[in-house]
Image (tube, helix red, strand yellow):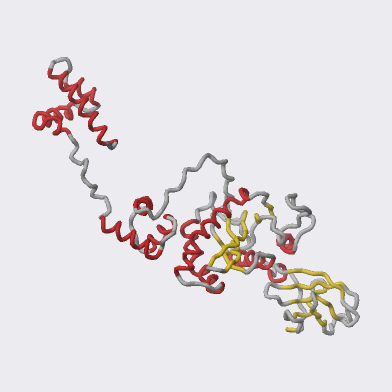
Amino acid sequence: MRRTELLQEIKMMRFREAFAEWKAGRLTQQEAARLLGVCERSFRRYCSRYDLGGLAGLKDGRLGRPSHLRAPQHESWELVKSYEARHKGWTAKHFYAWYQRAGGKRSYTWVKKTLQKAGLVRKAPHRGAHRKRRDRAPLPGMLLHQDGSRHEWVPGQYWDLIVTMDDATNEHYDMRFVEEEGTRSSFEGVEAVIRAKGLFSSLYTDRGAHYWVTKREGEAVDKTRPTQFGRAMQQLGIEMIPAYSPEARGRSERAFRTHQERLVRELAMHGITTMAGANTYLAEHYRVAFNLEFSQPSLEAGSAFVPCTTDLKEVLCEHVERKVGGDNCVTFFGVTLQISKQQYRCNLVGVPVRIHRYTDDTLAVFHGPRCLGRYRAEGEPIVQETSVAA
């Protein structure tokens, strides 16, 4: 027996007792009504219905009737068929996002329960108590997360998905697939954010070798020996914060779990199998839809982003020190870079110089702030120029 039916049976038994006491003169109408928790007028209405139809006259006529708000059966069938046809294996929340974009008007609860009733979506297991989550940063730009996830995003191909997101709003500022996570992919993600939003205050990362130098596995990072990426963040005035457990990166870990559930299925549905196509889909469709669904307002109004006046190209790249040889050349990982004649000095033999390797593999040689030349990856000069590095 359902709870509503049980309550109705109890209500009818109590009425019968109160009615008998009133008939016997032991209770007034006011006392009998108070006993049932209703007003005198309602008690008199119950008495009239009881005289006409007995206990059956007291039954609520709405019980057993479908609600006028209930979705028609054909709508439930169409939802189930749509899920089975193109979205099988999707979570209820992922499917609901697509259902809304397709013009669906029903609630998430209705969609979820309809799919669960059809046996297409499993009920989530009960979760036990967990420690309290860290509060989000109050303003956008105060704390960003950058992390990567290696996964079989398309059948037979494992790529790294690099995400740069805001702690305050959960907004994903940059998402890109790369063959392997490293210094270059981290530079590209940070550069995209700074060019779009401005400089931010701090960056939360794992202890990957391109982020931090760690003397021994499991030990604290060595903040006195920055990596190429760490040096670039110091130049930009961005504080780096290392994470010492997966739980510490909970927000990005939960986001990657969602991406692995959704993105694999969306790429498959659109027939995307190449990294170039997947990156286009990320930029033009997936990231926009994800931010619309999962981003949230910051705890406080305003922004911690500030304009950037630095030449990012010269900062977000690898810097390597070399000495000029007797033939006015420097060698960089087997590539010989010939320095052309400079107007400001006769030769640079024995002079320490700095080589910049950019994310597109091109190179440049600097003496202090002055650029002595730019080169392709093979060492061929691109242009001879004199410029000042930021």
User: Within the image, what quadrant is residue 338 found in?
Assistant: bottom right
Q: Residue at x 63, y 60 (%)?
A: 306
Q: Is residue 15 visible?
A: yes
In the figure, 78 relative to 241: above or below? below
Q: Is residue 237 left or right of residue 132?
A: right
Q: Nearer the viewer, residue 178 or 282?
A: 178
How many numbered callouts?
A: 0
User: Within the image, what quadrant is residue 10 found in?
Assistant: top left
Q: Is residue 111 visible?
A: no
Q: Residue at x 76, y 57 (%)?
A: 213
Report the quarter where the N terminus lies: top left
In the figure, 35 relative to 162: above or below? above
Q: Is residue 340 left or right of residue 94?
A: right
Q: Nearer the viewer, residue 156 or 289?
A: 156
In the figure, 232 relative to 47: above or below? below
Q: Position of residue 108 (x, y in %)?
A: 38, 53
User: Within the image, what quadrant is residue 85 found in?
Assistant: bottom left
Q: Position of residue 319 (x, y in %)?
A: 77, 69
Q: Position of residue 206 (x, y in %)?
A: 66, 55
Q: Position of residue 289 (x, y in %)?
A: 47, 63
